C-alpha cells in the first residue's frame, strides 16, 4: 500500500545490517551457516527482540542483487526494477544519469576482413585488458557526446554515452557466433537512429585504436538507460545513508537517492563510519559482502567466519542505542549451491515496540518459530517505520 | 508471477504423491487421521525434509476437485477454472474436445401433456437407468453433429454434442419445478441459436425413444464447453505423466496435457507403473483416491488405513531416488464432516536443496511447525521447480 499519507516525523534511528546472501539451508550434514556460526551477540539480540523469515520476490524465486535490495528497501521487486545497465554502471562505481545510454561490451578478436575470430579475445586476462580499455577511454572522441568506458573483468567492459537526445533502443552488435563481422548497431526505433550511428562510430574508432592488438574489436549488448525509481528518502521521509564497501551496493543506494558515505576499509571501519555519521541520518544501510562471496565460493567455513565478523561488531552498533535494528539478508547464497537461492532469509528485529518472542538464537530454523512470521521482504519496511514511530493510524 | 522467462532445463525428477482429501482436523476425541495413522516411512521423509501447510483456494474456502488439482499443479484456482462440463466429462472418462458442448442431464418423468411429474424420475436406480441411456446413445441421430450420452449415477447423465459451430450459451431446460413442461433450450446469444435447436431436437428424440418408460424425458443444465487451460508441460517445461486410477483425475491430467499412463490396478501397481515409466518423464502425478472416499463415508479407520497404504509404498518410491518428492492433499475430507473441507493440508517436501527442519513426523500439527510455512498451494509449484533446478535467477 502507499505509505505516503501515513508518514509522520520521528527522531528514531533505524539501522539495517544486511549480510549479503545470508540465507542458507540445512541438510543431512548440518545446519545452515548462520545456525552453526557462533553468534552470541546476534543471539542476545534475537532473544531480546523478535524473529521471522522473509521471501524476496516470491516462493521459489531466486533474486538477483537488484530485486534483493529493492525488497529490503520496501520496493516490491515485481513492481520496481533497477535496469541492468544501471546496475552494471553501479557495479563500476559510475553513476548512470537520466539520458545516458550504457551497454555491456566484450573485447573481441577480429581477422583482417573484420570477421570475428574470438568473441571474448581468448578471455584476455585483466592485466592485459585494462591498458587497452584505458587507451580507448583516452583516445575515442565523438562529436556531441561524452564517452565513458570502464573495464570490468577479463574481456568485459562497460561503454556509456552521455549527451542530449540519446535513445537506448539499439540492437545488440554481438552476432553470438564467429566467422562473421560484428552486427551494425541498428536503431530498433526511428528515435534511436542517431544513437545507433554514434555507437557505430565508437566501434569504428575502437577498431582503429586497437589495430594490431590481440583484442582489436568490441561487441555491444544490452543497451540500457536509467529507469527512474522513486527515491527512498521521498518515499519514506527518511534521511538515509549507505555504509557500503562494494561499488554495486554503493551504486544501488545512490540510484535510490541515499547518501553514500565514504568507502569504508573493513567491517570495523564501517562501524566507525556509522558512529561518525550517526547524528546526520535517521536510516543506515550497512552492507556486508563477505557472506555472499563465501557462499558463491562454496566455502562454508568462510561464510560462517563472515557471519561471526558481523556478530563481533554488534555490541559497537548497539552502543549507539539505535531505536530500530534489523539484521537480515537479501537472498540465500548456500555454499552447497555456490549461487544465489530462493530460500527465505532470516530476519531479526530489535526495537522497543517490535515485541519479544521465545526465539533465543538467530538462524533460519529458530526464526521460523518467531513472531514476525514468514513474509515478503518488501512488507518488512513498513514494520520498521512503525517501530520508529513514523506511521500514523490508518482510518478513523 | 509468470515463471516462463525463468524456466531452464534440468534432468531432475519430481514425484508428487497426492492423497486425495488428506487433510483433517483434530477434535476432543483425537488427532487427525494422518496424525493418528502409523506412518514410519512418511515420518522418516518428514524428518529428512521440510514440512508446511497449504491452503488451496483461500482461508475458509472448501475446494472442489477442479480447484484442488489446479492449485496442486501451480494454477491459481481464482484465476484458472476447469469448467463443470469438462470435469463431468473427465469423471466419465470422456474427453471434452475444443468446440464440444456438454450438459448435465437428469432423466425425468413427463405426463401425457409433456408436463414434468418428477424431475428425477423417482431417483430411478442405476440398473434401470443404464439401458435407457444406452438406448438413447444408440438411437438418437442429429444431422451434422455427433451425440455422446453417458450414464453417471441414478437419474444423472451427461449429454455432449460434437461438431462445428457449436456454442455453449444455451439456457437450462430444467424449470426446477413440476407441473410445467421442460423449458425450451434458449439461445442466450444469437451465436448459440443453432446449438439450442440441436439440443431441442435431442430432447424431442429422447421423448420419442423413451415413450412409455417411467423415465421418459430429459432435463438439461450447465451447458459448457472446454475452457482451454494452458498446458502443464508448456507452462513449466516438464514432460509430465499421471499415475491415476480414477477417471476424474485421469481426466484432469489429460485436460492439462499430461500423458495419462495405463490405468493401474491398485497402489502396488501404481508404484510398478511409476517404475516402468520413470525414465520417460520428469514429473509424476501419483493420485490416491482411497483417503477421500473414506473421508466422504465418514469412516475414520478406513481413512487411516488408506494413509497407511501409501506409507507402505514410500520406500519403493524412494528407491527410484527422485530428486524432488512432495506428499500432500488437494483438500481436507474430515470423516467428521463426510465432505470436502477448507482446512489447510499438510505438505511434505523432500529434496536435496529443499532444506531440513526440526519436524520429524508427517501430520497437520507437526507440519504447522515446519519451515515451509503456511502457503497457498499454487505457490508450492515454483518451490518444486526451484528444488529441481528449473528456475533461473530473477533480475540482475
Image (cartoon, coloured by chain):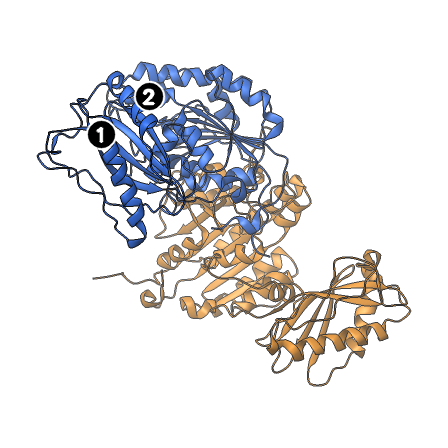
Chain colours: A orange, B blue
Q: Residue B316 at what x, y percent from top left?
A: 55, 17
SS at mark 1?
helix
**Where residue A201 sits in the image (x, y, percent)?**
76, 78
Closer to the camera in the image, B283 or A37: B283
Dot 2 corresponds to which residue?
B293
Q: Which mark is first along the chain, 2 or 1?
A: 1
Above/below status of A159 relative to B110? below
Horizontally, residue B158 falls left or right of residue A223, namely left
Q: Which chain carries label 2?
A: B
In the displayed structure image, the side of residue B83 where residue B356 appears, left or right? right
Q: In which quarter of the image is the C terminus of chain B?
A: bottom right
Q: How many neighbours does mark 1 have within 10 angstroms: few (below 14), some (14-19), or many (20 or more)?
A: some
Note whether residue A299 is visible.
yes
- In the image, taking residue B293 as reference, residue B180 lies left or right, namely left
- Drawn side of residue B113 relative to residue A38, left or right: left
Secondary structure, mark 2, is helix
Q: How far apart are marks 1 and 2 (CA)?
A: 39 Å
Identity of the residue furthest to the left in this view: B179
- The residue pinned by badge 1 equals B208
Q: Which chain does the numbered disc 1 sit on?
A: B
* Number of the front mark, 1 or 2: 1
Amino acid at each position: 500500500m502507499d505509505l505516503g499519507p501515513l508518514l509522520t516525523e520521528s527522531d528514531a534511528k533505524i539501522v539495517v545490517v544486511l549480510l549479503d546472501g545470508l540465507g542458507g539451508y540445512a541438510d543431512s550434514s548440518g545446519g545452515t551457516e548462520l545456525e552453526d556460526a557462533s553468534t552470541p551477540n546476534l543471539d542476545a539480540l534475537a532473544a531480546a527482540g523478535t524473529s521471522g523469515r522473509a521471501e524476496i520476490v516470491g516462493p521459489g524465486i531466486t533474486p538477483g542483487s537488484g530485486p534483493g535490495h529493492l525488497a529490503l528497501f520496501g520496493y516490491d521487486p515485481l513492481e520496481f526494477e533497477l535496469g541492468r545497465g544501471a546496475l552494471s554502471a553501479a557495479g563500476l562505481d559510475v553513476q548512470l544519469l537520466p539520458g545516458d545510454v550504457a551497454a555491456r561490451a566484450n573485447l573481441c578478436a577480429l581477422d583482417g576482413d573484420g570477421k570475428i575470430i574470438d568473441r571474448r579475445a581468448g578471455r584476455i586476462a585483466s592485466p592485459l585488458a585494462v591498458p587497452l580499455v584505458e587507451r580507448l577511454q583516452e583516445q575515442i572522441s565523438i562529436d556531441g557526446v561524452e564517452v565513458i568506458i570502464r573495464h570490468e573483468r577479463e574481456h568485459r567492459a562497460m561503454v556509456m554515452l552521455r549527451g542530449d537526445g540519446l535513445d537506448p533502443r539499439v540492437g545488440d552488435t554481438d552476432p553470438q557466433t564467429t566467422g562473421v563481422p560484428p552486427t551494425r548497431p541498428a536503431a530498433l526505433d526511428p528515435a534511436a537512429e542517431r544513437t545507433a550511428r554514434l555507437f557505430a562510430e565508437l566501434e569504428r574508432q575502437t577498431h582503429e585504436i586497437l589495430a594490431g592488438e590481440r583484442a582489436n574489436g568490441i561487441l555491444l549488448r544490452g543497451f540500457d538507460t536509467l529507469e527512474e525509481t522513486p527515491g527512498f528518502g521521498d518515499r519514506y521521509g527518511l534521511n538515509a545513508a549507505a555504509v557500503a564497501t562494494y561499488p554495486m551496493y554503493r551504486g544501488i543506494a545512490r540510484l535510490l537517492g541515499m547518501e553514500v558515505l565514504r568507502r569504508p576499509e573493513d567491517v570495523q571501519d564501517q562501524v566507525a563510519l556509522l558512529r561518525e555519521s550517526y547524528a546526520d541520518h535517521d536510516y543506515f544501510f550497512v552492507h556486508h559482502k563477505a557472506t555472499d562471496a563465501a557462499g558463491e565460493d562454496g566455502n562454508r567455513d568462510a561464510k560462517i567466519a563472515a557471519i561471526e565478523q558481523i556478530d563481533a561488531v554488534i555490541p559497537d552498533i548497539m552502543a549507539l542505542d539505535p531505536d530500530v535494528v534489523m539484521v537480515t539478508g537479501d537472498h540465500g547464497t548456500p555454499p552447497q549451491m555456490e549461487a544465489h537461492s530462493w530460500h527465505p532469509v532470516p530476519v531479526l528485529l530489535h526495537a522497543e515496540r517490535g515485541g519479544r518472542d521465545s526465539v533465543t538464537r538467530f538462524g533460519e530454523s529458530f526464526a521460523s518459530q518467531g513472531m514476525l512470521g514468514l513474509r515478503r521482504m518488501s512488507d518488512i519496511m513498513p514494520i520498521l517505520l512503525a517501530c520508529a514511530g513514523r506511521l500514523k493510524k490508518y482510518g478513523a
